[in-house]
Image (cartoon, grey):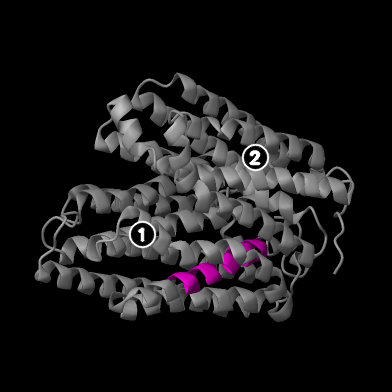
Amino acid sequence: MHETAAGPPGRTPRSLREAWVALAGLSAVFLFEMLDNSILNVALPVIGRELHASTTALQWVTGAYAVVFGGLMPAFGAVADRFGRRRIMLIGLVLLGVASLATAVVTTAGQLIAVRATMGVAAAMTTPGSMALAFRLFDEDGPRVRALTLISTVGLVGLAIGPTAGGLVLAIAPWQVLLLVNAPIAVLAFLGVRSGIAADDPSGLHRDPLDVPGMLLGTAMIVLALLAPTLFVDEGAGSWKPWAATAAAAVTATCFVVRERLARHPLLDLKLLALPLVSSGLAYKAATGLATAGLGYLVTLQLQLDWGWTPALAAVGMLPQVVVLIAGSAFVGPFVRRVGLDRAAWISAAAVVSGLAVYGLLGRFGYPWVATALVLVAAGMRVVGVVAGLNVVRGLPANRTTIGTALVDTAGEVTAGTGIAVTGTILAVLFTGDIATSHWSPLQTGEFHQAVTIAGLTLTTVAAALVGWGIARSRHATGDRRDDTVPQTA
């Protein structure tokens, strides 16, 4: 299957060379998204000392970015489908560059939180459009899979090297450099997208009025859904705050659904979510987000607190996952070509569930079982990250693809928070005393093992239900191309 730059002038690259220039720019966008928090986390103790930040303030240095990013993605996805994906992405990259440079003059924790929130806005403007634009760089599924695999590989490399690179930088430079590095990344992405992707073709956009009430309700719903898990972990299940946030999220979600069903021009046509490729892709992505966040949280606690590994040794213990995530790029394309997109999606999602089950049942019996679980989840995630998003884009009308990719990222963000909340709540209920204490009693060790088993199997059950739903929905898909699934008007 040869690679060809896709379709009509004004919507897609004019040559294969321009397509790959654009792909380099889109890869830089994903590099920023994945590198950002991973490289910053290692600097939080230094930031806390220099800015005299409280524990809560430090939490929001990373949390403000995640909450704003996740909350605004659907809104900016809708804006991009209305006013142009390339245009919104370029504006977001400029905002990212400016916010990154502002780090140089930050003197308080509040200012840094504001900068991080602004970066979250920029990420919400740039990330959803990257997959939609990459989908249109080529006119065949084979090159599209390779393009999305390359983009995700660049991002995963950033995620993997972030802590190590951050530690090396801190040894010779101030912590501000870790955020200033986003400025040249933004410049590279801007140049690649601007020179490699032509202006949006009006026929690929819609002209419906923006659903502002729907945007506000949708943003509030997602922000509350992301905030509630954090509160469960920080405040505990006995506090009223996480339950209030959960209730508010449920009420807001109900209002959002009612609004979208009644609106003449809704932010999100709920009928689109029922399309087989769309619903199956979102289910697979949700299962993966739940599994990877929950497993990562549990394994980190187990290696360092239960087994007494040093942070450096624990980082080495996570290497099987890192190796699979990075090296797996060479196998995604051949695997998809061999089994097809639909089978690749459910097989890889099933691998994620299997990894969770292995950890829940056998993880406490030794590191080989932990490594096996990490490899299975990473291998599944590596494929799902490409295929689930591609299926969602294939299943949507051409003028709704950006909000579709925003939903893919949002599904991963929300379920990742849910995975951490589930594990954190189970640990809080079953473990007596301070979990961070240096020496556990035999009773506490037994409680931790029980909590790990229950949390792991709970996540396995929920993820398996999502994968089962995804498989059932994918069987209703009537074809591999969007043109065979839905009309081109919304």
Q: Which residue is mark 1?
A: 314
Instruction: Sort mark 1 into few (<14), some (14-19) or many (20+) by Cα contacts within 10 Å.
Output: some
Amino acid under label 2? Pro
Magenta stretch encompasses residue 375: yes
Q: CA distance from mark 1 to mark 2?
A: 51 Å
User: Label 1's element?
Assistant: helix
Q: Quadrant of the C terminus?
A: bottom right
Residue 387 percent coordinates (x, y): 64, 67
Q: Which residue is mark 2?
A: 209
Closer to the camera, 94 or 333?
Answer: 333
Closer to the camera, 350 or 104?
Answer: 104
The region drawn magenta spans: 374-392
Q: Quadrant of residue 334?
A: bottom right
User: Please, what is the dominant secondary structure of the magenta stretch?
Assistant: helix
Magenta stretch encompasses residue 194: no
Left/right placement of residue 317 relative to residue 329 reads: left
Q: Earlier in the sequence, mark 1 or mark 2?
A: 2
Q: Quadrant of residue 183?
A: top right
Left/right placement of residue 53 relative to residue 13 reads: left
Q: Quadrant of the N terminus?
A: bottom right
Residue 277 percent coordinates (x, y): 64, 69
Q: Residue at x 25, y 37 (%)?
A: 55
User: Label 2's element?
Assistant: loop
Residue 388 is at least partly visible in this image: no
Residue 340 is at least partly visible in this image: yes
Q: Residue at x 40, y 57 (%)?
A: 315
Left/right placement of residue 199 relative to residue 115 reads: right
Amino acid under label 1? Ala
Relative to 137, residue 347 above or below? below
As drawn, the residue found furthest toward the front would be 172
Residue 397 percent coordinates (x, y): 71, 58
